[in-house]
């Protein structure tokens, strides 16, 4: 009888070891997956969004959740900062505008009041986060921004480890924003975006003329690079280039008016 008990105990220990080992391996294999499936309503929240500290008031569903990192020296955040990272959530809430905004006012550790108050937005601090909540009253859509204490934090960079290298940064191009997000559309999509500032080399030889049309050079290079891709198209008038690359639907927008190149990649979840 004792031998049988010992055999059962040993077998149980072996099974536990196998299960733990399997769970560890599965965790390692999925460390780049940023979805959260705590509840059906939270499926489109990024893993890492601080929902315990910043609840989504009377949420019906999440429309999108993205994280942005912006290092554009010309850009200032909602909280008057340069070089910033933040989560952005678009949600559908069952709360009225007044209920929605009052809720966040009441959970702020400290409310931040601007000189010129926006009747559709409140701002404040919750723990280490600077938070804005907006609801404009025209429908049931709410907007939450959660600004992180440090834009270079390792927890921020993990979202971009798998960002496909599509456009090469060079002397003509400087990356100034990137985002990663989950979209509640078409059965669920993952979206990567970047924008780049195009650098004007100016008149180096002093002849009174711009030495190079950087946009034309970049445009020709992208046409050559992507024209062989499946579903390739280019609307020269609008500067919109599209193609498919593996699982991704890729879009490049060449915007002379903004002085930028925009990149957007989407794929099914």
Image (tube, grey):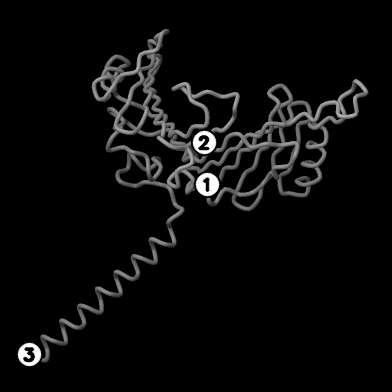
Residue 198's quadrant in the figure? top right
Q: Toward which corner of the image does residue 115 lie, by quadrant?
A: top left
Percent of width and height locating residue 31: 43, 56
Q: Position of residue 264 (x, y in %)?
A: 61, 38
Bin the neighbour count of mark 3 within 10 Å (Cα to Cα): few under 14, some 14-19, many 20 and up.
Answer: few
Marks 3 and 1, the one that precedes in the sequence: 3
Whichever of labels 3 and 2 marks the residue nearer the N terminus, that label is 3
Residue sitting nearer the eye, 206 or 2 = 206
Q: CA distance from mark 1 to mark 2?
A: 10 Å
Figure label count: 3
Residue behind mark 2 = 69
Quadrant of res 92: top left
In the image: residue 38, left or right of residue 196: left
Q: CA distance from mark 3 to mark 1?
A: 56 Å
- The answer to whether 128 is drawn above or below residue 123 in the figure is below
- Asked if the residues shown at circle 1 and circle 2 are in contact, with their CB atoms under 8 angstroms apart, the answer is yes
Q: Which residue is mark 1?
A: 160
Residue in the picture at 39% in, 31% down: 146
Q: Which residue is mark 3?
A: 2
Q: Residue at x 25, y 25 (%)?
A: 107
Q: Which of the two labelled residues, at mark 1 and mark 2, occupies the earlier sequence position?
A: 2
């Amino acid at each position: 009888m004792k031998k049988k008990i010992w055999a059962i105990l040993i077998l149980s220990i072996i099974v536990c070891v196998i299960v733990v080992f399997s769970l560890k391996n599965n965790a390692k294999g999925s460390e780049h997956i940023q979805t959260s499936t705590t509840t059906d309503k939270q499926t489109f929240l990024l893993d890492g969004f601080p929902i315990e500290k910043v609840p989504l008031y009377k949420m019906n569903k999440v429309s999108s959740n993205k994280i942005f990192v912006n290092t554009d020296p010309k850009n200032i955040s909602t909280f008057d900062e340069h070089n910033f990272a933040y989560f952005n959530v678009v949600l559908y809430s069952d709360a009225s505008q007044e209920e929605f905004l009052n809720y966040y006012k009441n959970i702020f550790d400290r409310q931040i009041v601007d000189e010129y108050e926006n009747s559709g937005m409140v701002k404040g601090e919750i723990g280490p986060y600077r938070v804005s909540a907006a609801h404009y009253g025209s429908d049931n859509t709410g907007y939450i921004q959660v600004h992180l204490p440090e834009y270079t934090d390792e927890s921020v960079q993990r979202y971009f480890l798998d960002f496909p290298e599509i456009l090469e940064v060079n002397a003509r191009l400087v990356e100034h924003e990137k985002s990663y997000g989950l979209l509640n559309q078409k059965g669920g999509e993952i979206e990567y975006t970047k924008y780049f500032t195009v650098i004007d080399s100016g008149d180096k030889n002093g002849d009174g003329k711009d030495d190079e049309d950087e946009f034309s050079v970049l445009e020709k290079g992208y046409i050559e690079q992507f024209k062989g891709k499946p579903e390739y198209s280019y609307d020269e008038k609008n500067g919109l280039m599209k193609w498919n690359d593996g699982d991704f639907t890729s879009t490049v927008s060449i915007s002379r008016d903004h002085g930028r190149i925009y990149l957007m990649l989407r794929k099914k979840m």
